[in-house]
Image: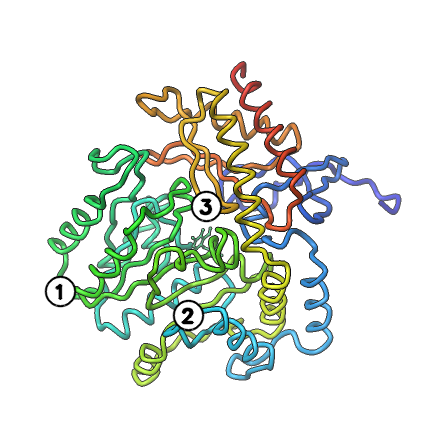
């Protein structure tokens, strides 16, 4: 600590609060699945940072790539290319199915979705975009217009033509029709409503294969295939936003592989950079050719930046070399078994859902009515943090109160068990708070 006095709390009086109050701690370093605070506390990170650090914190492959790229080239004029960018595109296509064939590299998830929406609008000639009522696609103007889970009030009009589809959460059926098994009635009802509102300018549907902020809701069996069919019938493009699910987290390289559907446009972000700002918009040759012919413009300061691209290459290589999809599948089964076991002992555990190492625990006041336990859920995460575990909670009206559990895919089995022990204790302790 070099003799300097170190504040153990973050000084916040000169910061804009962009998402409520800041956590009352100051992180000094992060390594593997652990964070260390200025006052020496160790915190097990069950959110992989902001769901990005799937390789864990400080992975040597990422640090080496940063160091190496830093010594060669960090940033360029946006019309210039470096080898890391062209190689990243090649390496990405090697793990993606046809007809996905062309990519552009940006910085954030919101930006990648923005580019996807602009591509879809230019290609289709329409502007109507459907997204789930529980969606989160980012904070840039187009992406936020298709984000319904939060942040809509107070910022003026959303993009004209944006419409919401019911979130197919079988535990909390959005049309009070199913219980525990979605028969896709909400999808057909949602598309019929969109048709009624349409001014005849359909462009795209944008969807997360597992809604994250929407309460860890995996799309039900058959849903994506039916959605793709609805899109085809209307001349809409299907955009899948795999910000959180891509590159191994759900037990396969990409979540869409589990649904037998290839999107027209795929966006990758968080997990592609492993903690650095890197995102990708990927599409087919036909769509890219058409958009280019129409003068597609999405020129940003950091498009095709070499350093993040080098890191993206290191991330993909590590995901493959360390077989992280298989690890996520196996460790996910261990984590899920542990959460199911907690469900047998804690009445408040209403539902455990998700895939691989992206799991959610829906906490309820009553298992029959499934009334969300908002205050209790918040108390559980606060107690977890006191006990040394970082677990996130999402709660919005209609979506429930859901603990989001997504540790790094490199986590050790014993660390999963330790996290489960802490959640167990927090579920008990929070009852008295
Ligand atoms: C599914 C999904 N898409 C897009 C975004 C936006 O990404 P970013 O915050 O990098 O703009 C997020 C962020 O949480 C996300 O979860």
Mark 2 surroundings within 10 Å by alpha-carbon count, few (fewer than 14), some (14 through 19), many (20 or more): few
Q: Which residue is mark 3?
A: 355
Which of the marked residues, 3 or 1, is nearer the chain's N terminus?
1
Image coords of residue 258 (percent x, y): 39, 55
Q: Nearer the viewer, residue 199 or 380?
A: 380
Q: Which residue is found at the position 52% from the left and 41% from the top?
A: 333
Determine the secondary structure under disc 1.
loop
Q: CA distance from mark 1 to mark 2?
A: 32 Å
**Is 76 on the left-hand or right-hand side of 211?**
right
Q: Quadrant of the N terminus?
A: top right
Where is residue 168, by image quadrant?
top left
Q: Nearer the viewer, residue 232 or 296?
A: 232
Q: Quadrant of the C terminus?
A: top right
Image coords of residue 423 (percent x, y): 57, 28
Vertical position of residue 119 compared to residue 43: above or below: below
Determine the secondary structure under disc 3.
strand
The circle on residue 106 is none
């Amino acid at each position: 600590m070099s003799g300097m006095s170190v504040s153990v709390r973050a000084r916040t009086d000169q910061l804009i609060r962009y998402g409520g109050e800041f956590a009352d701690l100051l992180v000094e370093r992060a390594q593997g699945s652990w964070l260390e605070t200025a006052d020496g506390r160790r915190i097990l990170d069950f959110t992989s940072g902001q769901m990005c650090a799937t390789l864990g914190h400080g992975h040597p492959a990422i640090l080496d790539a940063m160091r190496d790229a830093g010594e060669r080239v960090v940033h360029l004029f946006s019309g210039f290319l470096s080898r890391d960018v062209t190689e990243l595109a090649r390496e990405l296509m090697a793990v993606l199915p046809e007809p996905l064939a062309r990519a552009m590299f940006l910085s954030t998830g919101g930006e990648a979705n923005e580019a996807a929406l602009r591509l879809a609008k230019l290609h289709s000639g329409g502007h109507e975009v459907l997204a789930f009522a529980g969606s989160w696609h980012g904070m840039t103007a187009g992406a936020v217009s298709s984000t319904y889970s939060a942040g809509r009030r107070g910022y003026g009009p959303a993009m004209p033509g944006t419409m919401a589809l019911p979130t197919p959460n079988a535990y909390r059926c959005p049309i009070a029709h199913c219980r525990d098994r979605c028969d896709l009635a909400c999808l057909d009802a949602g598309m019929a409503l969109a048709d009624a509102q349409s001014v005849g300018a359909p462009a795209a549907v944008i969807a997360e294969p597992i809604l994250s902020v929407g309460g860890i809701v995996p799309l039900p069996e058959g849903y994506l295939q039916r959605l793709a069919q609805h899109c085809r019938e209307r001349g809409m493009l299907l955009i899948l936003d795999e910000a959180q699910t891509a590159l191994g987290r759900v037990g396969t390289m990409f979540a869409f592989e589990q649904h037998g559907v290839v999107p027209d446009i795929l966006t990758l972000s968080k997990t592609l950079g492993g903690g650095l700002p890197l995102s990708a918009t990927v599409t087919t040759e036909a769509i890219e050719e058409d958009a280019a012919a129409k003068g597609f413009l999405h020129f940003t300061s950091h498009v095709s930046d070499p350093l993040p691209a080098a890191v993206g290459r290191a991330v993909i290589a590590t995901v493959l070399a360390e077989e992280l999809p298989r690890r996520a599948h196996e460790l996910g089964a261990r984590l899920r078994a542990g959460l199911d076991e907690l469900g047998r002992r804690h009445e408040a555990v209403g539902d455990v859902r998700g895939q691989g190492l992206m799991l959610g625990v829906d906490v309820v006041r009553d298992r029959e009515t499934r009334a969300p336990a908002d205050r209790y859920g918040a108390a559980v995460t606060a107690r977890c943090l006191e006990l040394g575990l970082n677990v996130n909670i999402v709660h919005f009206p209609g979506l429930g109160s859901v603990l989001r559990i997504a540790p790094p895919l490199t986590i050790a089995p014993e660390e999963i068990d330790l996290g489960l022990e802490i959640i167990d204790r927090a579920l008990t302790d929070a009852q008295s708070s």
